[in-house]
Amino acid sequence: MSVPAVEYAIQTLLRMSMDKFLLCNIDVLMEYEGAIQRLADAIPTTSWNPFCLKTCLSLYTGIKAQTIRANALLCLPTSNRRIHDLRRRLAVVFLFNDTALARHSPEDVVTVTGIADLLSGDAFAINLKTDFAELKASIILLDIAVDDGSVVALFHDREDEKAFNDAVDELAAKLREIWRKINDSGMKLARTEAKSVVEWVQQRLSNTVRTRRKAKKSVFDLPDEAENPFLPRQQDYMKKFLHKQPKSLAAEDDCIVVASE
């Protein structure tokens, strides 16, 4: 096959994968994954960046709903280096609404801080007009774009590592705030699903994207330093326990004191 034919075949498969049928049929999905990986590997290295730009531009202009876009990305395997790269480029373009970002690898054009800034926009606002299916899809795209945080080399020093972890913490905190604002107490499945996805991504950031897990705060830490919502309750319990006066043996009516010789 010629390079243009391979590129057209991949773009056609990507459009086909926007149908939920593919995600629901494991046999077809496996065949799809194998086919798109073989096609991607057939593209010359010099043609990869231009191909990614054309593909991202085609899908971005043709489909506007994030829910449909997310379906296509969820069908792409992450085990293949090229497909993984294309998957992230598409997610970045869909999130930032900027096809020019597809010209380069995501780690060269996007940072965790930049993605965190997106959460202050209208697409992630929680109000009476929020489309929770679209919100869920946008969070999935965000998760794909972040990936491992683009940590591709060792940090120059501890300050660089700390700055990265601080950026991850900021992103996780903004997701946690979105989670808190979603009221899923009613029988509204879209809200519940969106809230679950937000929580899952927030936990993944804190536990796997961070270079090291945050030290768990003890129940004796200061209240204003507590991040866990259950810590204040634990602190109150421990204070009451430690200040509880033991009962005197003399006060026990049914207590028998045996003198030792």
Image (spheres, helix red, strand yellow):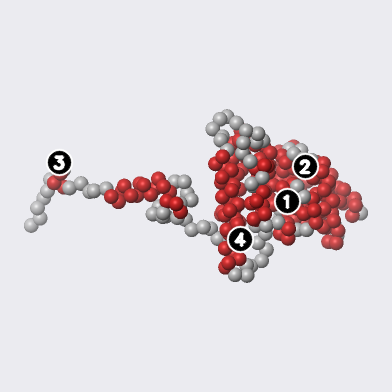
Q: How much space separates mark 4 and mark 2, taking CA atoms?
A: 34 Å
From this viewpoint, which residue is outermost toward the left?
261
- Lower sequence index among marks 1 and 2: 2
Q: How much space separates mark 4 and mark 1, taking CA atoms?
A: 19 Å
Residue with the mark numbered 3: 254
- Lower sequence index among marks 1 and 3: 1
Image mark for residue 17 = 2
Image mark for residue 92 = 1
* 259 relative to 154 in the view: left or right: left
SS at mark 2? loop
From this viewpoint, which residue is outermost toward the right?
2
CA neighbours of label 1 inside 10 A, class few (<14), some (14 to 19), many (20+): many
CA neighbours of label 4 inside 10 A, class few (<14), some (14 to 19), many (20+): many
Q: From this view, report whether residue 119 is shown above or below residue 131.
A: below
Amino acid carrying label 1: it is Val
Q: How much space separates mark 1 and mark 3, taking CA atoms?
A: 74 Å
Q: How much space separates mark 2 and mark 3, taking CA atoms?
A: 77 Å
Q: Nearer the viewer, mark 1 or mark 2?
A: 1
Residue 200 seen by the camera: no
* Residue 229: image location, x then y, percent: 47, 46
CB under 8 Å between callouts 4 and 2?
no
Residue with the mark numbered 4: 164
